[in-house]
Image: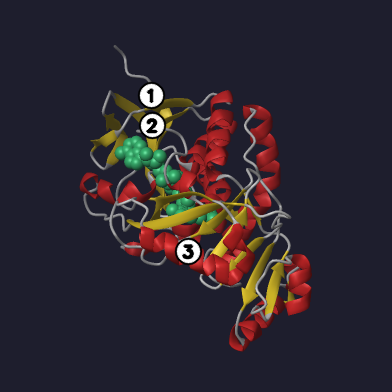
């Protein structure tokens, strides 16, 4: 039987692979996405779904502009994929409060608020902060208020992107594990999978925390991605509810539309282990109650863990693999994969269509690790 050739094969159907498939299919590029499990089932499902570029990095940091740009893309993108797919990614434009519990942090937040004024950020004293979010602890001295940051369901976002991509003509094979690359000299011409072989002019590795396991496929380049376990807890949200994302001491609280309050998260270098532990649950709950003492009355709903794809400099790898034509990386998004999914999908589509890396994502060039 003749093997069908695609323009692009995407390996991995998390939020990153799904976004890439969507942006490519939207431009009429023929795409096949191969996912060994289900769409959005791994880190994307485990995540807190915060779209918080201002809280995650500082003005001038590499990747700051890409984070802000990605956030800007969200409203129109959500509208488009929701219309096409019928799946609501449950995006909530909540704003964010970052609390300070000592004088030094309060002063640092004041300085940061000033540097972020153009994004509508301001420093609130304790009374003003409590007006925004009455449940915060009496120990909080003040807060940075950031009105433009928001949150979303990572899993629903991935599924909406994938389904919208399918509506635009992208092909999907779920339950299909990619086992290696097919090459011709220094060019990648497709992949070998647990079921079939597939041909394509371009292959994009978007397989999250598992990208580092592909190193044996790549002579001369090591993908520096390691799994970092993140544990989360869900409580039933208290009534009256919490309206904003709250960053407390070593903790964040995200009130989701499903009536739960997500409490996260740990960072553990323990390989591919995703078992939730009693110790982490205890630590998260203690920090949550330190931030908002009245959470002690909430019902415990669930706990889970996922694997963040980490790189040594905590920035993703998005761009061509040096020395191997036709192979592109889109992995290593660490703590910001949900946030960066829009700009990554857009950037990879631009790269493949124009054969050049857009300026916005040049700071994510995999070549920096040679
Ligand atoms: C607890 C926690 C909280 C988080 N909170 C946030 C947050 O608030 N905001 C934010 O922006 N980010 C957050 N993150 C990070 C974010 O979840 C990740 O950066 C993002 O989901 C990475 O997406 P991905 O598509 O690269 O990976 P994944 O969602 O893990 O998808 C990778 C996919 O590749 C598939 N795959 C792997 N190998 C193969 C193969 N050989 N063949 C076929 N398929 C393969 C896997 O099955 C998987 O479905 C959080 C992460 C965790 C764990």
Q: Which residue is mark 1?
A: 5
Q: From what the image shows, is residue 186 above or below residue 82?
A: below
* Residue 74, x across and y down, in percent: 66, 47
Q: Which residue is mark 2?
A: 34
SS at badge 2: strand
Is the CB of the residue bearing disc 3 within 8 angstroms of ligand 1?
Answer: no
Is the CB of the residue bearing disc 1 within 8 angstroms of ligand 1?
Answer: no
Q: How far is mark 2 from mark 1, CA to CA?
A: 14 Å
The residue depicted at 56 percent of the width and 38 percent of the height is 156
Q: Which residue is mark 3?
A: 284
SS at badge 1: strand
The color scheme shown is: secondary structure
* Residue 77, x across and y down, in percent: 66, 41
Mark nearest the camera among 1 and 3 is 3
Is the CB of the residue bearing disc 2 within 8 angstroms of ligand 1?
Answer: yes
Say whether disc 2 or disc 3 marks the residue closer to the N-terminus.
Answer: 2
Circle 1 crowding by C-alpha within 10 Å: few under 14, some 14–19, many from 20? some
The answer to whether residue 128 is visible is: yes
Say whether disc 2 or disc 1 marks the residue closer to the N-terminus.
Answer: 1
Say whether disc 1 or disc 3 marks the residue closer to the N-terminus.
Answer: 1
- Give residue 176's quadrant in the image: top left
């Amino acid at each position: 039987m003749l093997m069908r050739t695609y323009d692009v094969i995407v390996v991995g159907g998390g939020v990153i692979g799904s976004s890439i498939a969507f942006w490519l299919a939207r431009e009429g590029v023929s795409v096949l996405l191969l996912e060994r499990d289900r769409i959005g089932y791994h880190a994307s499902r485990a995540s807190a779904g915060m779209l918080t570029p201002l809280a995650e990095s500082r003005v001038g940091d590499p990747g700051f502009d890409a984070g802000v740009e990605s956030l800007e893309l969200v409203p129109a993108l959500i509208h488009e994929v929701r219309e096409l797919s019928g799946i609501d990614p449950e995006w909530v434009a909540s704003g964010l409060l970052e609390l300070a519990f000592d004088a030094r942090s309060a002063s640092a937040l004041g300085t940061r608020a000033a540097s972020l004024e153009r994004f509508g950020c301001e420093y609130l004293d304790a009374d003003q902060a409590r007006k925004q979010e009455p449940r915060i602890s009496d120990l909080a001295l003040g807060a940075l208020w950031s009105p433009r940051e928001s949150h979303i369901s990572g899993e629903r976002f991935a599924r909406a992107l994938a389904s919208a991509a399918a509506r635009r003509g992208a092909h999907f094979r779920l339950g299909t594990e990619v086992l290696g690359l097919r090459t011709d000299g220094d060019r990648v011409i497709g992949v070998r999978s647990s079921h079939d072989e597939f041909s394509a002019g371009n292959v994009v590795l978007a397989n999250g925390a598992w990208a580092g396991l592909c190193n044996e496929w790549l002579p001369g380049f090591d993908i520096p991605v390691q799994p970092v376990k993140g544990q989360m807890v869900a409580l039933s949200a208290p009534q009256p509810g919490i309206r904003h994302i709250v960053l407390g001491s070593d903790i964040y609280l995200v009130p989701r539309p499903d009536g739960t309050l997500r409490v996260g998260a740990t960072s553990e270098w323990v390989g591919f282990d995703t078992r939730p532990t009693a110790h982490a649950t205890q630590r998260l709950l203690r920090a949550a109650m330190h931030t908002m003492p009245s959470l002690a009355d909430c019902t415990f709903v669930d706990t889970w863990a996922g694997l963040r794809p980490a790189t040594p400099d905590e920035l993703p790898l998005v761009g061509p693999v040096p020395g191997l034509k036709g192979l592109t990386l889109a992995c290593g998004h660490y703590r910001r994969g949900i946030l960066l999914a829009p700009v990554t999908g857009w950037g990879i589509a631009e790269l493949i269509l124009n054969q050049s890396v857009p300026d916005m994502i040049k700071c994510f060039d995999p070549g920096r690790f040679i």
